[in-house]
Image (cartoon, rainbow, N blue to C red):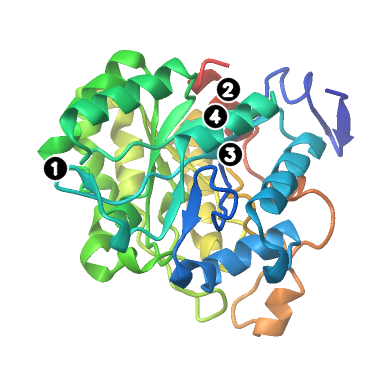
Amino acid sequence: METINRGSHCIGETGLTQKKVVDIHAHIVGPGDSGRGCSMSREFRFGPAFASMLMGLRIGPLEATDGKIREAVLASIEASSSINQAVILALDGVYKNGSPSGAETHVVVSNDYVMGLAAESRKVLFGASVHPYREPKNLQAETRRCLDAGAALFVWAPASQQINPEDDRCIPFYLCLARAGIPLLCHGGTDFTTRSSAAKFSGYNESRRLTRALDIGVKVIVSYCHASFGGVFPPYDYDSIDDLVEMLRAADENGWELYADISALCSPSGTSCIERIKREIAMQKVRPERILFGSDFPRPVIDISSIRRGMTPDELRQRIVQGGNMFDSAFDTLMKFGMDEAVFTSAADLLNI
């Protein structure tokens, strides 16, 4: 990769203390017209989450096909001058009694689909997703298949997938990941992406529920640092990140391989959380290596350095970063906001890249 100079930092194959920059958290979805492993419910397709993704990809709703979205995602990754690689996340469906529950599943991105992306581009890392409530033999077989295919990590969205991380059915999966040394990226904070993220499931995203996985020896990445995404515009509301920060502070003492990513924090709902994380690092209460860069691509990026309380919706829309590469926009925005350099490079060590 060609080296790119951005201010006082040298970014690229030889940039940022000579380490690779890995985006730990990027998405792809598709309406399913190709029959290659993506699907979404009508509710999701006409909901705000998909509209936001299409805005980021600069794709109109009438041209949103699997192929068009796939092409835009790969083009964005290849064109980025700030990141060396990005983890594209699969998403397993909801499972009940060992079998898929199609009626309660709103988004599926199959492991095969993301494996195909990784085969097309060396800059794509395979983020696998396997629901722990699958029938035991199927769970074991699919997890092993993903590991053999080079999964960089596994991902759950507990509220959306209706996974309780404290459920005993998760233990075989935890043991497998601990033996393999492969991280589990677990979505945290409030999740309003799908109807299956109803209030009765929202507690599944609490970081404390991951204590069992950490005690077993799983490398756990809590995603979003517990920012709330209930509203795009003011009034701002936030989930408390006190539990997560307390766990991060105690990680060394407890022998936990605990990390958190800062994906989706380039937004009004994320500024409070990112300021808290910066303070924890500055006070040396949380090691910067435990905080990982993620863009939540293709979520639109907002210039958080210019956000102030009480802004109107129009003022906030004007701060959405227009044009350019979205991976680069997220990187540049967080760098400008003063994030520690280790945040951008630690994922490469964690994923053994």
Secondary structure at numbered mark 4: helix
Q: Give the distance between the C-alpha atoms of the residues marked 2 and 3, in whole angstroms.
A: 10 Å
Residue at the (58%, 55%) spot, across then down:
33
In the displayed structure image, the side of residue 57 where residue 165 appears, left or right: left
State which tag comes first along the sequence, 1 or 4.
Answer: 4
| Label placed on residue 293 | 3
Q: Quadrant of residue 64?
A: bottom right
Q: Nearer the viewer, residue 220 or 275?
A: 220
User: Residue 178 location in percent, x, y?
Assistant: 29, 19
Q: Which residue bears the numbered disc 1?
A: 167
Q: Type of residue at label 1?
A: Asp
State which tag comes first along the sequence, 2 or 4.
Answer: 4
Q: Type of residue at label 4?
A: Met
State which tag comes first along the sequence, 4 or 3.
Answer: 4
| Label placed on residue 348 | 2
Q: Give the distance between the C-alpha atoms of the residues marked 1 and 3, in whole angstroms.
A: 29 Å
Q: Are marks 1 and 2 in contact (CB under 8 Å)?
A: no
In the displayed structure image, the side of residue 235 where residue 329 appears, left or right: right
Q: Type of residue at label 3?
A: Phe
Camera-nearest label, 1 or 2:
1
Q: Are marks 2 and 3 in contact (CB under 8 Å)?
A: no
State which tag comes first along the sequence, 2 or 3.
Answer: 3
Q: Is residue 182 visible?
A: no
State which tag comes first along the sequence, 1 or 3.
Answer: 1
Q: Nearer the viewer, residue 109 or 319?
A: 109
Q: Type of residue at label 2?
A: Ala
Secondary structure at numbered mark 3: loop
| Label placed on residue 115 | 4
Q: Give the distance between the C-alpha atoms of the residues marked 4 and 3, in whole angstroms.
A: 22 Å
